[in-house]
Image: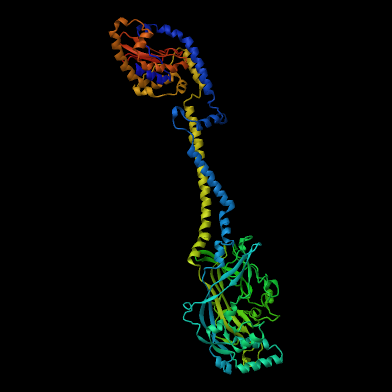
Amino acid sequence: MKELVQIWNRVTGKQYSSVNSNDKELRDLSNNRLRRDIDTSTFEANLSECEGLNSKFSDDLDFSEGKEEIINRLFTNRRNGQKTRKPKCLFILFLLGFISLGVAFVILFLHPYDVLFRWKVVLSDGGEIFESWRKPEVKLYCRVYLFNVTNAEEYMSGQDTKIKVKEIGPFVYREALEHSNVTFNENGTLSTIPLHPLIWEEELSEGNKEDDILYLPHIALLSIANVVSQQSFMTRFGLNNLIGLTNSQPLMKMTAREFMMGFKSELMTLGNTFMPSWIYFDKLGLIDRMYDFNGDFETIFTGENDISRSGLIDTYRGSTDLPQWDGKYCSNVQNASDGTKFQGAVSRNETVLFYRKSLCRAAPLIPVEESIKNGMKAYKYVFPEHMLDNGKYNEKNKCFCRHGKCLPEGLIDVTDCYYGFPIALSYPHFYKGDDVLFSKVEGLTPNKEQHETRFWVQPDAGLPLDVSSKFQINMALGDISNIRHVEKFSNLYLPLLWFDIRMYTLPPNLELKFKLYLNILPVVEQCWMYISFIAGTILILITTYILTFKIMFKSYAKKNQNINFRPRLWVERERKNNGNSKGDIYTPCEVPLSDTDSDQTYDTKSTFLKTQSDKIKELGHRLGDKVHKFELTHSKHNKKQSDRKNSLITPEESQDETNEAFKSDSSESDSYTNRYREVKQSDSEDDCKYLEVLDDGAEFDDKNYRRDRKNEMFVHIE
């Protein structure tokens, strides 16, 4: 009986005290049913209460009306101490999604790489790029090629009308570039003194030595003769006597080092003695004079105000213009590079400037090719066509004509940069020069690949990756026919040497560092931005989907599954059943009984909201077998007690025979108005027991049920 009562409590959601039924009660069944009217009214009141509970979950429920309940179900704990519904993990994922999107938008609009790049490129005291600029670790070489005169005696004797020259070299020196005495200024510049000491590199000289004896021009004699030839007769007479006394010759044997770094002569000694303001040195060498930076100083842009100008020249010797040229186009050196660092953030067609003291001007460089150099993006720059024109093709270049005297195309007069000596610059072997330059000289073979200047520059940072600056030093002699020993050199453009300032590649540590800054970090920034966008969007969509459809709507739907959304139809059906005094109440039960079932707790509210007839129908088949077995056993026991067969057992006696465990089950029944009792009916053929709802307001419907005498139960007719 205990098991039956437990199952009944599970069906109805309530607990009742068990009462033993007998024949007396069965006969008084009709009297008990008279209470139907009173119980029916109570039952209808409960149905009205259920209707009120269900009304807010009707089919036409607006989501806004139920949002408070959805939120409550989302963030409140479940009953009976079960796991909380608070979605901490989802909240964290949702927050991470917003953080990812925030990071993506920060990268998109603020460009943190640009901030890092600016921080690195600006020349600041102790900065990484500043130290690389102040004393570059790159290996910069000066490769010198001398023009040895192969027919010196024949030409001087008049046998040959042209000077024959042969290129000898390279003689390689390493240039230890350094910017010394650095002082930072308040206007975004720094002041420094450039130093370019040379170190002999015999291993790179390809077997050529500084001690090699060559026939080379006597630069001091030819230079003084060119200067004095325009002076008065007395000045020319004095010079001719001096040349005769010293027996100076325009071509002489000397070592390669003497020609490049300087050699002593009587003429230079006299010039230094009597004209110290003009010749303050006692020996003359072309490379030595070319790398003479005595008294030079310059100001450099730090990039504080404009990072694209970082490392570029602001002023040279205190001015933005060179004093030897007239006109801004020829004299300007501002925003030019000395080759250490070029202008940054340049476009594909933008021109940059290059200045070296040996060049004596700021020369434009134009991009002609884009490629990958040393693993980095680079533009190839060359000098524009007709750069060494003196106004023949480019009208602006007329300012390079010294004192109105223009040299042939391919030469630029740099006399004022070389102490008044008649020095002119050209490309090696008179490359791209006028044909007149080859009229009195043999042995020159201009070649584009060997003699063209080129710069490979990383356009974003202005970093030089491969440098080859090539120029030739020549003597542009005028009419010196009135000077002794040099008459044959009148109106001659005599090649002396050409040099190649060469940087092959960056040091491995600098190359790796700049690859990181220029190649890897921009890609990392872009990938990070796209990944942040994608990850943030996915996280927000997933968490929104889970919160909306997996938790809120799912919880809302689960709750509604336990509620009849048709309360009015439900009440009408109950009333109809009550009116016909018939209801689908009796169903077999086939659920096995166990003690463990009593430990489970059910939601009495949701169970009550289901109709009694539907509930019993749903579980009737599961209870049938157990109830039938229990009835047979109990019937035999009742036959033995024949003396009490027709008597009604009092509630007190019933309570003595009832297990004390059922008393606790009756505590929850106070909130419900319907009461149930067990009845036992003795039949003339067999003793069977049935469960009957006395207070449901429904009557037994003979049309819907038939009696199964074999199994001793009523069976519903479909």
Residue 400 occupies quadrant: bottom right
Seen in the picture, residue 668 relative to 650 is either above or below; the reply is below
Q: Quadrant of the N terminus?
A: top left
Taking 232 as reference, is 77 left or right?
A: left
Q: Nearer the viewer, residue 596 or 555?
A: 596
Q: Nearer the viewer, residue 26 or 338?
A: 338
Seen in the picture, residue 394 relative to 631 is either above or below; the reply is below
Report x, y in % for residue 338.
Answer: 60, 70
Report x, y in % for residue 318.
Answer: 67, 70
Report x, y in % for residue 58.
Answer: 53, 25
Q: Residue at x 36, y 14 (%)?
A: 690
Seen in the picture, residue 391 relative to 555 is either above or below; the reply is below
Can you see residue 275?
yes
Can you see residue 20?
no
Q: Quadrant of the C terminus?
A: top left
Report x, y in % for residue 43.
Answer: 48, 15
Taking 656 as reference, is 49 left or right?
A: right
Q: Nearer the viewer, residue 263 or 250?
A: 263
